Image (spheres, rainbow, N blue to C red):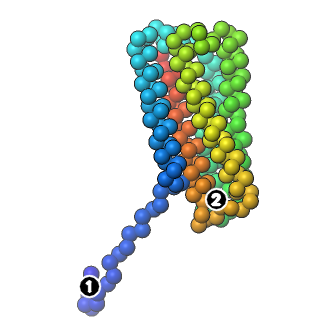
């Protein structure tokens, strides 16, 4: 490039934005998404073969439990967004409190799920109650397993944040935990209407 005076100007350089997290977590997230894609296929195949069971099924579930889990996961995910934003400013104390808030809200999920399952069993809704409930338990409990892994990740990054490991220049571990946690949010936002809303 030349300026009006005829001098050569350096070509502009493009700085690529780094992908949040790390390659390992994205491989893990991809594997989880493929797994749930197959499970969603099972859901639609079962629904196509047993439409009446899937039309009646949601009426027997405790919708308030599904709504509560949704609110807990979304709020927890928001806290992780704030945690990542805080560490990018080197606000480590603020980061720790946001991660801790995300963890505490996330722990509400298995607690709500425990009482939901107790309520279901008390009302005769178990894995033998019909195809809808078999698919419901398989998908939601599988999701709970992945949420449990995510909670372990949040405990890990909360500990490392408290120890001052992360900074604005090095926080890929915190971002990785946040990405995985958001993945569980997205999956639940698909699972929730499948079982609690759609007929």
Q: Residue at x 57, y 57 (%)?
A: 172
Provide the residue designation for mark 2: 86
Q: Is residue 136 left or right of residue 14?
A: right
Q: Is residue 78 visible?
A: yes
What number is the disc on residue 92? none
Q: How many marks?
A: 2
Residue depicted at 46% across the width and 42% down the height: 30
Q: Is residue 4 above or below residue 169?
A: below
Name the residue: 69% across, 39% down. 105
Q: CA distance from mark 2 to mark 1?
A: 42 Å
Pointer 2 or 1: first along the chain: 1
Q: Nearer the viewer, residue 2 or 175?
A: 175
Question: Would you say 24 lies left or right of 88 here?
Answer: left
Which residue is found at the position 48% from the left and 31% from the top?
Answer: 36
Residue 139 picture quarter: top right
Q: Position of residue 162 (x, y in %)?
A: 74, 57
Whole-percent x, y for residue 37 in the image: 44, 31
Q: Which of the 4 quarters of the picture holds residue 93?
A: bottom right
Q: Decide: few, some or many residues near mark 1? Use Cα within 10 Å; few <14, some 14-19, many ≥20.
A: few
Name the foreground residue: 65 vs 31.
Answer: 31
* Residue beneath disc 1: 2
Q: Is residue 159 left or right of residue 4?
A: right
Image x and y of residue 127, in percent: 60, 14
Instruction: Find numbered disc 2 in the image and state the secondary structure of the residue it sits on.
Output: helix
Taking the image as shown, residue 12 lies to the left or right of residue 46, namely left
85 vs 46: above or below: below
């Amino acid at each position: 490039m030349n300026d009006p005076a005829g001098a050569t100007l350096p070509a502009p350089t493009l700085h690529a934005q780094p992908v949040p997290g790390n390659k390992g977590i994205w491989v893990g997230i991809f594997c989880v998404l493929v797994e749930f894609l197959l499970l969603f296929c099972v859901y639609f195949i079962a629904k196509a073969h047993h439409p009446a069971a899937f039309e009646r099924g949601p009426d027997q579930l405790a919708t308030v439990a599904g709504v509560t889990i949704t609110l807990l996961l979304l709020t927890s995910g928001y806290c992780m967004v704030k945690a990542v934003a805080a560490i990018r400013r080197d606000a480590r104390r603020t980061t720790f409190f946001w991660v801790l808030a995300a963890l505490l809200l996330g722990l509400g999920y298995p607690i709500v799920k425990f009482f939901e399952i107790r309520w279901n069993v008390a009302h005769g809704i178990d894995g033998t109650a019909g195809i809808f409930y078999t698919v419901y338990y398989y998908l939601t409990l599988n999701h709970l397993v992945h949420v449990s892994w995510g909670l372990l990740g949040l405990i890990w990054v909360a500990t490392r944040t408290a120890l001052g490991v992360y900074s604005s220049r090095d926080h890929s571990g915190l971002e990785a935990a946040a990405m995985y946690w958001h993945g569980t949010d997205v999956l639940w936002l698909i699972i929730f209407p499948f079982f609690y809303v759609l007929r």
